[in-house]
Image: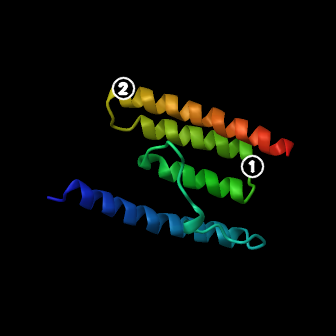
Amino acid sequence: MASQDEKDQDYDEAFETWARALLAHAAARFPEKPPLTYEDFDGCTFVPDYCRHCCLVHDIACYYETGRAAADAALRDCMLKTAGMDREWYSRWLGSGRAWAWYAAVRGWALVWRRK
């Protein structure tokens, strides 16, 4: 049976493979812009690893400017859906709160950024 460290390493490797493929696809769709790379992606601050995929999709949408408000809502929805997956009730509640807090933060940042 695999240890937790081995499972974490397998997850990290699978995530990196998926992320690199998604980033390559996005770069091919927007050749006029320098590509966003896996090394540029830093995840989300204060967001658990199991939501990294939500953050990556959000970062891609923001980087390639495909619609900030829709990207922010998709981040929230992805985090809400992920929070509801096979976790204890208190984790779902905490994850839902985190999703809405993160949504408020990215929407607030979008408004500040727009004013600059």
Secondary structure of residue under mark 2:
helix
Give how far across and how far down residue 103 sits, in percent: 62, 36
Give how far across and how far down residue 41 sits, in percent: 57, 60
Residue at x 38%, y 38% (from the top left corner) = 85
Density class for disc 2 (Cα within 10 Å; few <14, some 14-19, many ≥20) is few
User: Which quarter of the figure has residue 113?
Assistant: top right
**Label 2 to label 1: alpha-carbon separation:** 33 Å
Density class for disc 1 (Cα within 10 Å; few <14, some 14-19, many ≥20) is few
Q: Please, what is the three-letter code of the amino acid marked with disc 1? A: Gly
Residue at x 62%, y 50% (from the top left corner) = 58
Q: Is residue 94 left or right of residue 78?
A: left
Give how far across and how far down residue 94 sits, in percent: 43, 29
Q: Residue furthest left?
A: 1
Mark before the other along the chain sequence, 2 or 1: 1
Q: Toward the viewer: 85 or 51?
A: 51
Secondary structure of residue under mark 1:
loop
Give how far across and how far down residue 5 sits, in percent: 26, 58
State yes or no: discs 2 and 1 in contact (Cβ < 8 Å).
no
User: Which quarter of the figure has residue 100?
Assistant: top right
Vertical relation: 90 (above or below) 115: above
Residue at x 55%, y 67% (from the top left corner) = 38
Q: Which residue is mark 1?
A: 67
Q: Is residue 65 left or right of residue 26?
A: right
Q: Is residue 79 left or right of residue 73?
A: left
Q: Which residue is mark 2?
A: 90
Residue at x 56%, y 65% (from the top left corner) = 22
Classify the position of the N terminus by image quarter.
bottom left
Which mark lies nearer to you, 2 or 1? 2
Vertical relation: 43 (above or below) 10: above
Query: In the drawing, what numbered circle is on residue 10?
Result: none
Q: Please, what is the three-letter code of the amino acid marked with disc 2? A: Tyr
User: Which quarter of the figure has residue 90?
Assistant: top left
